[in-house]
Amino acid sequence: MIIQEITDDFQQPLRDRRVLLSMELLAASTLESNDRARFVMAVSALEPLAQQAPLGDEVDRFVERALADLRADGALPLHLRASLEGRLRQLRTESVRQALSRLCAKWFPGDRTARDTIDHVYALRSEILHEGRVSDLDTLLGVETLKVRQYLRRIYEQEFARAFRVGTTV
């Protein structure tokens, strides 16, 4: 059975390098030394899958107006203006969090729990990265990591159009 699984896997074409990176990050998460690092790495495996879509012509026009206003403002130091310009340009596309929410409709049609869970774990990851910890100290990161792994597994099964035979573990 193991040889057949390996043979089947090598016969699968890699359609998207983002999926491979996601799988590598998820695999790397298992090597982390504590629950917090495992969780952050597992949730980070979602990011390569979140292809950010443009927000459209109206947003582009708004950004162009804001950029013109910024360039016309001589009071701001050059280094600050350059930083703000880069951040304004990013407004043309949806955020990673928005992209994940949108893609949940594709990955998990009709499953509102999946979208809510992925949004929740992404928010927890942001808390950890920006605050150093989650605000709710009763959060069990091992349990949250398992949820992420299970959703990623479902995504990978869709990407490879096959069911995996071995379950997930934390």
Image: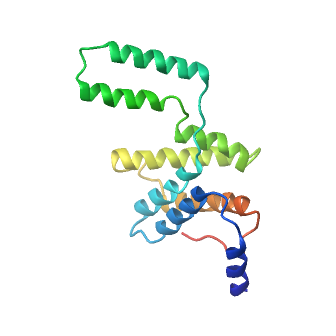
In the rendered image, the vertical position of residue 126 relative to residue 3, given as above or below: above
Residue at 72% x, 46% y is 106
In the rendered image, the vertical position of residue 32 relative to residue 92, given as above or below: below
Residue at 34% x, 17% y is 71
Q: Is residue 134 visible?
A: no
Report the side of 26 relative to 114 (left or right). Answer: left
Residue at 62% x, 59% y is 152
Q: Residue 90: where, in percent of width, then height?
A: 47, 32
Residue at 71% x, 43% y is 105
Quadrant assignment for the N terminus: bottom right
In the rendered image, the vertical position of residue 155 relative to residue 52, given as above or below: below
Tell me the quarter of the picture where residue 97 sits: top right
In the rendered image, the vertical position of residue 49 relative to residue 58, given as above or below: below
Q: Residue 15: where, in percent of width, then height?
A: 67, 59
Residue 96 versus residue 165: which sits nearer the camera?
Answer: 96
Q: Is residue 57 visible?
A: yes
Residue 117 versus residue 153: which sits nearer the camera?
Answer: 153
Quadrant assignment for the C terminus: bottom right
Residue 87 versus residue 112: which sits nearer the camera?
Answer: 87
Q: Residue 55: where, in percent of width, then height?
A: 59, 28
Q: Residue 84: where, in percent of width, then height?
A: 35, 27
